[in-house]
Image (cartoon, rainbow, N blue to C red):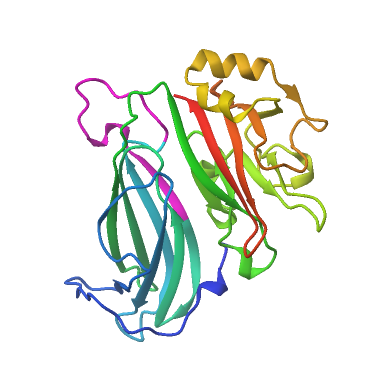
Amino acid sequence: MRFRPSSLLLAPLFLTACEPSLQSGPRVEFVGSSRFNPSDRRLTTAGDTIAVKVYAEAENDEAPLKHLVIRARYTPRARPIIYPSLYKEDDSLAFELVYLDTLLAETGQFAFQSVQPARTTAGKETWQYEFTDTKGNRGARSFFLRLGRTDSAAAFHNYTVPLQAPLTGAAGISRRTFLALREGLTLPSFSLRRIPENQRMTDLVYVPGTTIAAPGLATTTDAALKLPWTGRATQIRSTNLTANDFTNAATAAQFTTLFNQSTAFTTATRTGPLTKGQILAFRTPENKDGLILVSDIITTGIRTLVLQVRVAK
């Protein structure tokens, strides 16, 4: 049985920017407003978030909606690359992420809103929202985002992302609690439960604190998390580095040296309570080393760790 996010169900909505489909099947539209993104756009911030509201309607009562898939296609891949001097954008380095794959209670209308992570590497990403009805007909809408960066020739990839506290129950299914360090993508639990490809790229998880203790981080191999999949063997360690040390680390050799000089935590797979300004060292299973600076710990609203990351390309 696939995951059914009942909290995504909303009442029917008035739509803007309708574009009637010429094919048989579900009709899918974006809802545009000052908050929700309905069309292609250029991003100015790496790791930004995009709010989207989507509405779908079955073609007729005999073929209700039954399946929703959200995909993001990255060109080039979301993982950082060292661009050749004659780089040309094509599909040879494209990567597709299935963000959500869920069965729906058969219905004539379905509306939902989602706040999704944008890429942290330079390039293009295309988000597609595809509905299937009980007769197998499909309807879809998509838009693309493009991010340009001036540091594509650097030996490391850097970005800032928020990692959110998990919440049990349907209300917390969309919290972006997991982090893929190389790609700089934060993902909710529904992106991982039934999608092995996403599980294999995810490194860290937000670990809730208490009323008196700050939150922390754990790797996906941490036994206490009891994740229903085999985690990535990412290593995370403690350091005594300063903000200046973090800023000055700019080569793969420096990241490796700093990781080798770091210290394992008491439980090697989790940090314990973190502090603002704390710097961690990590090593991915591909032997890519890097640093994490805890730039903020937000305690109001959704509890959030704001992380600055530097990772060797």
| 132 is higher (above) or lower (below) than 259 | below
Farthest front residue in view: 244
- Residue 74 is one of the magenta-drawn residues: no
The residue at 32%/73% (across/down) is 33
The residue at 65%/63% (across/down) is 300
Q: Residue 131 occupies which quadrant of the picture?
A: bottom left
Front residue (pair 268, 159)? 159
Q: Is residue 307 visible?
A: yes
Provide the major secondary structure of the magenta segment. loop
Front residue (pair 91, 32)? 32
Image spot of residue 4 (x, y percent):
56, 68
Q: Magenta region: which residues?
A: 79-99
| 9 is higher (above) or lower (below) than 116 | below
Front residue (pair 254, 68)? 254
Q: Residue 7 occupies which quadrant of the picture?
A: bottom right
Image spot of residue 246 (x, y percent):
56, 27
Q: Which quadrant does the N terminus fall into?
A: bottom right
